[in-house]
Every structure is written in structure tokens, then in C-alpha cells.
Amino acid sequence: MDIAIVLYPRFTALDAIGPLEVLSSLPGAQVRLVAAEPGPITNDTGLLTVQVETPLTALPKPDIVLVPGGPGCFAVMQHTLTLAWLHTAHKTSRFTTSVCTGSLILGAAGLLQGAPATTHWGSATDLAPFGASYCHERFVRHERIITSAGVSAGIDMALWLIHELSGAPTMAAIQLAIEYDPQPPAPMVAPPTRHEDVSAEHWQVMAHRRAVGSAGSRLVWKISVLVVRARRSRERTTSSMHSLRDIGY
């Protein structure tokens, strides 16, 4: 079974590496890193460079396709060769999948028309132009297409693929081997709405981040910080008001 993970400049590392770690343990599977142009490909932080040996054209019919996200996705959405390869590969693939904003690339390839799908919360509104309806889920399956939410959600999706392809015991063994049992110090706060917690200016930049390029991921980080600060401030204010009422003020 051939599994193709499509890399491109400024991809997000965990989008690709998380699923790679899971899927490389699938019995009988060969995971290949592929790209439109083989060679060194650097991720969005500039701290990781991966040497890709296999061009897309060398693997026309993979069994599984996985497209990670990252600020570089917007350039790929206009790359004719990559989009054509995805469209053709999907015709024979068992599953075509994405992580984070990789779903926008699937949309640009014409694969999400009329489909429920997910992506990073910061790109939720970007799915509509491709005829897809956004679902706030960890991952979403629609026929042979599986899209997953931001970054870490790709590991969940990859484990589901293992379950589907090789059964629950294999999935459980891989999950145990990688000790995947997320227990964050605190629950993740809910994603912000367009008119909540952050300024209209930040949302406007988010809406035009194709021009922002590599700053896109930094902008998501900045908005996330603003959201958490704003909500904690409101929680402290609400708590103080309750305390005053409790003592008779």
C-alpha cells in the first residue's frame, strides 16, 4: 500500500510528521514524501528542511493521499500540476485526506464540492468558495475524503485510518507504541467568533492572509493569545462581581 504525503514550501511540520509517525507503522504500507519539485523543502517556521526524493509524477496512483496545511497552502492552491495530480490521484485512491488548511488545497482541486469538511478554525470561512460546508469536528469523513482540523488533529485522523485499514487491535498497538493519550494541562478554549475577543483589524488581515504569506501562522498565534487573554479577563471580572454579590454589595 502506497501512502503519499504531499509536501510543499512552508508546510506545517506536525501536519505531516504526526500522521507520518502513525501511518509508517501500518503493516504492508510504504509512506512516501512527494512534491511537485523534489529536493529540500522547508517548513513554515524555517527550522525544518526535508529532503524529498519522489516527484508527484512518479506516484500517480497512491492508495492514500495526505495533504498537510501551512501558510504555503495558498501558493499550492494555484499550482496547476499539483491540483491536477490530486484530482487524478483521487479517482483511484482508497482515501484522500488533509490536515489543517490542506483541505483548502483539496477544495482548489475540486474535491470538496457539496461535501462537509473541516480545517483549522482560522480558515473555517475559506471552505465555502469550494462548495464545502464547514464542520467544527476533529475530523470529518465524506465518502473517500477525510479532512481533519488544525495541526494535531491529523494524528487522530491517522489513527482512524489505521482502524479502518487494519482493525482495532493494530490501531490500539500503534496508539500504545507512540503513547498517544492527550492530557493537556487545561482544556482548549473554544475558537473565537468573527466578532468576539479580537479586533476587526485582525480578522480583516486573516481574511487576506494569502498576501501575508508566512506571517499567516504567526497571525493565528497572535489571535489565539488575544482570545485567551480576553476570555480570562472576562472570567476574572465575572468572578469578582459574583464575590461582591455574595457579600451583599
Image (spheres, grey):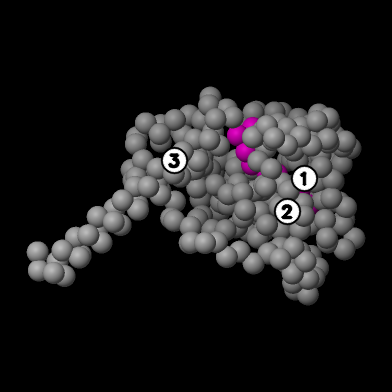
Q: Residue at x 36, y 40 (%)?
A: 198
Q: Residue at x 83, y 35 (%)?
A: 51
Residue pointed to by mark 2: 19
Mark 2–mark 1 contact, CB under 8 Å? yes
Quarter of the N terminus within the rendering: bottom right
Camera-nearest residue between 47 and 14? 47
Q: CA distance from mark 3 to mark 1?
A: 29 Å
In the rendered image, the residue lying farthest to the left is: 249
Whether the magenta-drawn stretch holds residue 65 is answered as yes
Residue pointed to by mark 1: 5
Q: At label 3, which amino acid type do we have? A: Ile
> Eyeballing the image, is 202 above or below 113?
above
Residue pointed to by mark 3: 223
> Eyeballing the image, is 168 above or below 54?
below
Quarter of the image where one finds residue 67: top right
Quarter of the C terminus within the rendering: bottom left
Q: Nearer the viewer, mark 3 or mark 1?
A: 3
Secondary element under disc 3, as helix, strand or loop, is helix
Count of labels in the image: 3
